[in-house]
């Protein structure tokens, strides 16, 4: 996770790269939307594949190799549309990465320690991201974007090689080749969407959870292009300053996530998660009403804390709720949430460009509030689920 975090810290500058290529707010919005939409389209068929084959370690590693490969053309692009196209193609082929990693962790972790482990695991990742953001900010300011993006590719390749050396933890697997898995994934797109209404009807509580998470995600996603343009053009923040702000937020996450994971495992994963959503609801208005870069440091501290609440408990609470066909239902959450994260930046970009950043931030807060209202009605956990470690709350 540390190496992955350093890579993500570098990749946080991709929207800034778009702006430096003379891109506008809609270019930034399309960069956030189209790759996410490509990945989202593929979630349901990949949910069927992982449920049937459980080749999660292999798919996770392949996703990292794809991330590594796509960084090379990105490093040498000269126009915003080129970055958007390459990133969108990556979205289609790296789609199973997040799903496969989640299923791998589900199989590897005992239910009673999931929040603690994931909070520490994510904390290590955010420590890496802190260093990666600082490193990339100063490196880009001195030498440009190509070299850091190539480093990003090498770091992802290293992650893939490490994952391939992990012990297999899948409780049910087969001898299907990676080529067969990808063929099945792309050929099952139509069937997966035909089955979706039935899957939703069968697990209504989990469906409502997915809707709440997705609407909350829509609110958060609306702010993407708004924040980028506000930082770069309105406040004239340098790459080094952006790196420092991102690193500060990451540092806060890293420090507080282990404690929040412990509290969540001992008391309530739902309560810690919802605390983060409440703070996230306030955050957009605070961000766009700051008039200097110095005023943003406290806002980024707040951002780090609310993301720590969410990320320390996200996986554990989902596992407390998820139905037996985990690959399919993890994919359904990814589909709902990914759709909102895909369309949110476009909505934010249009509204921000048309009527201003403050109304767009207000819409963001409203959507997060609606998601919060829905999530408050979702149970803290469903019935106990059986897994590789026996039955227990998961």
Image (tube, rainbow, N blue to C red):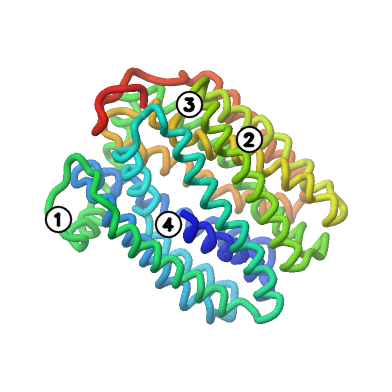
Q: Residue furthest right?
A: 291
Q: CA distance from mark 2 to mark 1?
A: 42 Å
99 horizontally vs 292: left or right: left
Are the residues tagged 2 and 1 within 8 Å (C-beta)? Answer: no
Are the residues tagged 4 and 2 within 8 Å (C-beta)? Answer: no
Few, some or many residues within 10 Å of mark 2 (<14, 14–19, 20+): many
Query: Which residue is denoted by mark 1 in the rendering?
Result: 176
Residue 70 x %, y %: 43, 71
Identified at 48% across, 66% down, the residue is 87
Looking at the image, residue 199 lies above or below residue 246:
above
Viewer-nearest residue: 128 or 49: 128
Are the residues tagged 4 and 1 within 8 Å (C-beta)? Answer: no
274 horizontally vs 72: left or right: right
Circle 2 SS class: helix
Q: CA distance from mark 4 to mark 3?
A: 34 Å
Specify the quadrant that holds the C terminus.
Answer: top left
| For marks 4 and 3 on the same chain, the one whose residue lies earlier in the sequence | 4
Looking at the image, residue 223 lies above or below residue 113:
below
Few, some or many residues within 10 Å of mark 3 (<14, 14–19, 20+): many
Q: Quadrant of residue 195?
A: top left
Query: Which residue is denoted by mark 3 in the rendering?
Result: 265
Few, some or many residues within 10 Å of mark 4 (<14, 14–19, 20+): many
Residue 272 x %, y %: 57, 27
**Can you tell which mark lies on residue 367?**
2
Looking at the image, residue 343 lies above or below residue 139:
above
């Amino acid at each position: 996770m540390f190496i992955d975090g350093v890579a993500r810290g570098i990749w946080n500058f991709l929207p800034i790269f778009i702006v430096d290529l003379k891109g506008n707010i809609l270019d930034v919005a399309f960069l956030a939307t189209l790759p996410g939409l490509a990945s989202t389209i593929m979630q349901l068929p990949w949910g069927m594949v992982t449920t049937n084959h459980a080749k999660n370690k292999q798919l996770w590693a392949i996703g990292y190799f794809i991330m590594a490969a796509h960084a090379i053309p990105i490093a040498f692009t000269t126009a915003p549309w080129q970055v958007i196209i390459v990133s969108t193609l990556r979205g289609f082929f790296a789609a199973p990465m997040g799903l496969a990693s989640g299923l791998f962790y589900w199989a590897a972790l005992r239910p009673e320690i999931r929040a603690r482990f994931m909070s520490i695991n994510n904390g290590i990742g955010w420590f890496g991201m802190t260093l990666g953001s600082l490193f990339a900010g100063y490196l880009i300011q001195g030498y440009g974007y190509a070299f850091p993006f190539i480093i990003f590719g090498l770091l992802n390749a290293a992650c893939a090689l490490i994952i391939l050396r992990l012990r297999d933890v899948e409780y049910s697997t087969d001898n299907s080749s990676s080529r067969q898995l990808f063929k099945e994934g792309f050929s099952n797109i139509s069937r997966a969407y035909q089955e979706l209404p039935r899957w939703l009807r069968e697990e209504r509580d989990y469906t409502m959870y997915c809707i709440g998470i997705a609407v909350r995600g829509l609110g958060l996603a609306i702010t993407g292009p708004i924040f980028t343009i506000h930082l770069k053009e309105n406040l004239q923040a340098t790459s080094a300053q952006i790196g420092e702000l991102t690193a500060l937020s990451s540092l806060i996450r890293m420090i507080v996530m282990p404690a929040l994971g412990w509290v969540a495992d001992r008391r309530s994963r739902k309560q810690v998660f919802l605390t983060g959503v409440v703070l996230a609801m306030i955050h957009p208005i605070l961000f766009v009403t700051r008039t200097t870069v110095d005023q943003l440091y406290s806002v980024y501290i707040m951002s780090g804390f609310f993301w720590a609440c969410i990320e320390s408990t996200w996986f554990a609470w989902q596992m407390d709720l998820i139905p037996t066909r985990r690959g399919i239902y993890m994919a359904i959450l990814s589909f709902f949430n990914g759709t909102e994260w895909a369309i949110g930046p476009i909505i934010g970009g249009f509204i921000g460009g048309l009527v201003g950043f403050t109304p767009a931030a207000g819409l963001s807060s409203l959507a997060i509030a609606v998601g919060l209202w829905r999530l408050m009605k979702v149970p803290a956990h469903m019935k106990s689920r059986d897994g590789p470690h026996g039955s227990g709350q998961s």
